[in-house]
Amino acid sequence: MKDAIYIPAYSDGLMSLLEKSDNDIKEDYQTDFDKKKSLRIYKKDNDSYFKNYFMLISAGTSHKRENFRKTIQAEDAMVFVDSGGYQLAHSTVNTVKYTDDVALKWSEQNGDIFPILDRPTFTLGMMRDGKPVSPYKDYQECLDLSVNSARHYAENRTRSDAKILNVIQGQTIPQVKKWYDEIKKYQFEGWAYGGTRGNLGRIVPAILFLINNKEFDRPKCDLFHIFGVTSNESMIYFQFIQMLLNKHNIDMQITYDSTYWNRTCVFGGYFTEARYITGTGMASMNWPNTIDYKNMSKDFKLPCHCPICKDLKDVYSFFNHYKTDKDGNEKLSFRDFNMNIAFHNLYLQLEYLENVTRILKSDMNEIYKEFFPKKIYDNLVFLEEVFNNMSKDWEGELNSRFLKVDTPPVVKVSDSSLAEFI
């Protein structure tokens, strides 16, 4: 039986690290560790801290890097390439130079699964420094360009072994239907859906819509990918929904990605433990760069027994890396922290997911009730009711249960540099 597949998304910062040789990484980033094991957890025949063979990389941030998959030694991995729609929506890539053809060719050279280069609508209305964030004027332009992309991918794909995903957009089912009706004629191996942040009030109606339109009855169409999930609570629901699909013999594989495990390190985020019965997701603490870590005890050890933290032999030095600016001032550097603690966070997140999946596979509501908070338990019971009657219109009930607001607010974006971490 299938499990929903979590695909860790690697930020551009980690990509830059993994372009280096293992020896260079050891010498430059792991000076305070003992065994200095490899951070290439997606490579089979190496001594890494742990293994996970799924990874998402972005063509939008990496398309100028040639032979990228080979450079980072990811031949053993199942590589999902995000085609770059997010970067287009935020105007962080050149919309003239970064074309459907550029995205398709780079994705085929470096990935196993990838979506068309859609033009997302979620930044329409956003402003940055008094100017629109999106390079597109309205919903229809985004849709027209996305349909053109689907046609280009259908007509110009060269790899029969790679899986391409069509993309749906929309905050409501009428919006999803309008998009779907125009793009569905280009048939690929599955569908992708973004802009939801993992919210089931958007995702489940979209899944039911595609199922009721017989998309997963088509030969070779069996993937549904959810972009940009930041909530560990969503992981519980995706695993449970996959179980429900299995029960109803629906040939659909749910995949989803998140870069939260390495993005949070940029702000000093350090996972401490998983929360199950008393909450959801990961408990964490912050290591701010405003602290004078020279006052730290040299006997201090991080409060974790994961493979990365166990190998960190000199915690004092790890927190006391400094660089000198052009004026000769000493400044604390969190570079080593960002690169290494990301894998600590990922290890704990994968452990959390494994334990949640084990509980769900008991297939007993009585056990769910003991293990999960009441809100999660109630939602699982509700989702089972939904998938037992998939032809019913559930959108209103799903929205009232999972959505905090009916319509997304207009957002002002002040710093586009954060885009590479999301």
Image (cartoon, grey):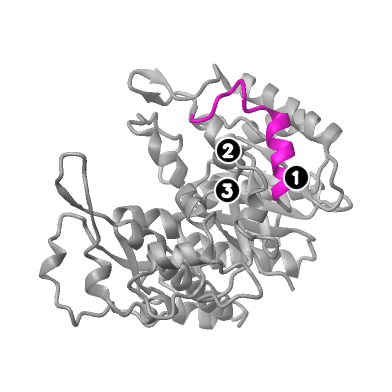
Q: Which disc is residue 358 wearing?
A: none
Instruction: Return the disc, 1 or 2, that comes first in the chain's sequence.
Output: 2
- Reading the image, the residue beneath label 1 is 108
Between marks 1 and 3 in the image, the one whose residue lies nearer the viewer: 1
- Reading the image, the residue beneath label 3 is 227
Marks 1 and 2 in Cβ contact (< 8 Å):
no
Residue toward you, 408 or 269: 269
Residue density around tag 2, few if under 14, some if 14–19, many if 20 or more, within 10 Å: many
- Reading the image, the residue beneath label 2 is 60
Q: Is residue 99 magenta?
A: yes
Residue toward you, 155 or 64: 64
Number of numbered markers: 3
Between marks 3 and 2 in the image, the one whose residue lies nearer the viewer: 2
* Image position, residue 139 (x, y; %): 59, 23
Element at label 3 = loop
* Image position, residue 177 (x, y; %): 69, 34
Element at label 2 = helix
Going 44% across and 47% down the picture, which residue do you hit?
421
Instruction: Work out whether residue 294 can be spotted.
Output: yes
Instruction: Work out whether residue 384 can be spotted.
Output: no
Residue toward you, 206 or 196: 196
Instruction: Return the disc, 3 or 2, that comes first in the chain's sequence.
Output: 2
Q: Is residue 105 above or below residue 255?
A: above
**Separation (CA) of disc 1 from disc 3:** 19 Å
Please give the range of residues in magenta.
92-110
